[in-house]
Amino acid sequence: METLTQAGLLDDARFARGRARALAARGYGDAAIRFDLERQGVDAEAATEALAELEPERDRALRLAVSAGGAVRAARLLARRGFGEDAIEAAAGVAENG
């Protein structure tokens, strides 16, 4: 493992960034992404750094909410996908108001 890490073939931070981007692109919120990264063995610091590089959670939530079909549906979808309360409230408000 040490040899692979030194050769640059194993890099937790690079893995965390790539995995976080992939999950965000599939519509997951920060809590779900953090949970997945920790389940994959990524340490908390690398997970936090990977999340910090993503588009803000609120912006991702707003984009998903537009196609959810109403505020209640948007809130449920976002909650299932691990979005935070602030992002859910903002996105549900946008979905409700059109």
Image: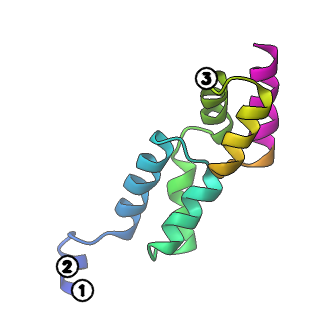
* Neighbour tally class for label 2: few under 14, some 14-19, many 20 plus, Cα within 10 Å: few
Residue drawn at x 60%, y 30% is: 64
Which of the two discs, 1 and 3, sits closer to the camera?
A: 3
Residue drawn at x 47%, y 49% is: 23
Query: Would you place residue 15 above or below residue 90 in this image?
Result: below
Q: Residue furthest bottom?
A: 2
On the image, the x and y values in percent for residue 38 come to: 53, 72
On the image, the x and y values in percent for residue 63 come to: 60, 27
The residue at which mark 3 appears reads as 67
Question: Magenta segment: does it hold 58?
Answer: no
Secondary structure found at label 3: loop
Say whether disc 1 or disc 3 marks the residue closer to the N-terminus: 1
Q: Which residues are magenta?
A: 86-98
The Cα atoms of the two marked residues, 2 and 1, are separated by 5 Å
On the image, the x and y values in percent for residue 12 come to: 38, 69
In the rendered image, which quarter contains the N terminus?
A: bottom left
Q: Is residue 18 left or right of residue 23?
A: left
Q: Quadrant of residue 13?
A: bottom left
In the rendered image, which quarter contains the C terminus?
A: top right
The residue at which mark 2 appears reads as 4
Q: Amino acid at mark 3?
A: Ser
